[in-house]
Structure formats: C-alpha cells, structure tokens
Image: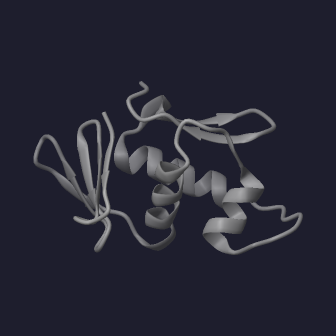
Amino acid sequence: MHEEDSAEGRIALPGVLVHLGNGQIDFEDGTRGRLRGRELELLQFLVQNRERVIPRSEILAKVWGLEGKVLTRTVDMHVSFLRKKLHLGNSLRAVRASGYIFEPGGT
C-alpha cells in the first residue's frame, strides 16, 4: 500500500514512512534512517510517477536539471541508494534500455 500525504509531508510505503521535510525514515520495526538531498527529491519524483516507466533522461532533467544527452551513472547510483535505504526490493526496478519503474508493494 502506498500513501502520499503532502499536507502532512510524508510518504507511506510498505514497512516504511518517509518524512519529506527532513528526510527522516521510520521503519515498522522502530529503526530510523535518513534520506538526503537528491535521494529525497528522486523518491518524490518516482512516487509522483509511479506505475510508469520513466526514462533516465527524464529523471535527470526533472530531478537534477540536466537536459540533453548526458552520460552519467548518477541516476543508477541514487536508485541503488534508495533501494538499500528503504528496503524496496523489486518495487523500484530498471527496465532495460528504458529507465526505471516504481511499483510500491512489489517484492
């Protein structure tokens, strides 16, 4: 289940609650973590565009402000960080030669 509560400034994902104001992560088991800067911006963008394949170029343009043909592994690295920090498993996955898709609740 996924819930975005912009009035409260948080995103609820399976087993985790992310506070958008400060990037704090509250896990179901009581542990905490933190998202920083672009990780938080990337998560918000992925949540807003969930259930659709988002090309890397669009992510770079919207989250990093980089336009045109940019060769960088920045998106891949930040996606990897999000997967690990939020325990997303296959909820956030690469689509070969296309980009990424975020499907909350995936395993």
Where is the N terminus found, in terms of image quarters?
top left
Residue plotted at (23% across, 38% down):
15
For the question of whether residue 73 can be seen, the reply is: no
Most distant residue in the top direction: 107
Where is the C terminus found, in terms of image quarters?
top left
- Whole-percent x and y of residue 75? 65, 57
Residue plotted at (46% across, 73% down):
37
- Whole-percent x and y of residue 16? 25, 45
Question: Residue 22 sits in which quadrant?
Answer: bottom left
Task: Determine whether, in the image, residue 28 is placed left or right of residue 45.
Answer: left
Most distant residue in the right direction: 69
Residue plotted at (22% across, 64% down):
8
Residue plotted at (60% across, 55% down):
77
Most distant residue in the front direction: 7
Task: Look at the picture and state if 65 lies above or below 57.
Answer: below
- Which of 94 and 33 lies nearest the eye of the viewer? 94
- Whole-percent x and y of residue 36? 40, 70
Task: Identify the coloring.
Answer: one colour
Task: Look at the picture and state if 75 lies above or below 104.
Answer: below
Most distant residue in the left direction: 30
- Total numbered circles: 0
Task: Determine whether, in the image, residue 5 is placed left or right of residue 55.
Answer: left
- Whole-percent x and y of residue 100? 64, 42
- Which of 65 and 107 lies nearest the eye of the viewer? 65
Task: Look at the picture and state if 22 lies above or below 57.
Answer: below
For the question of whether residue 100 can be seen, the reply is: yes
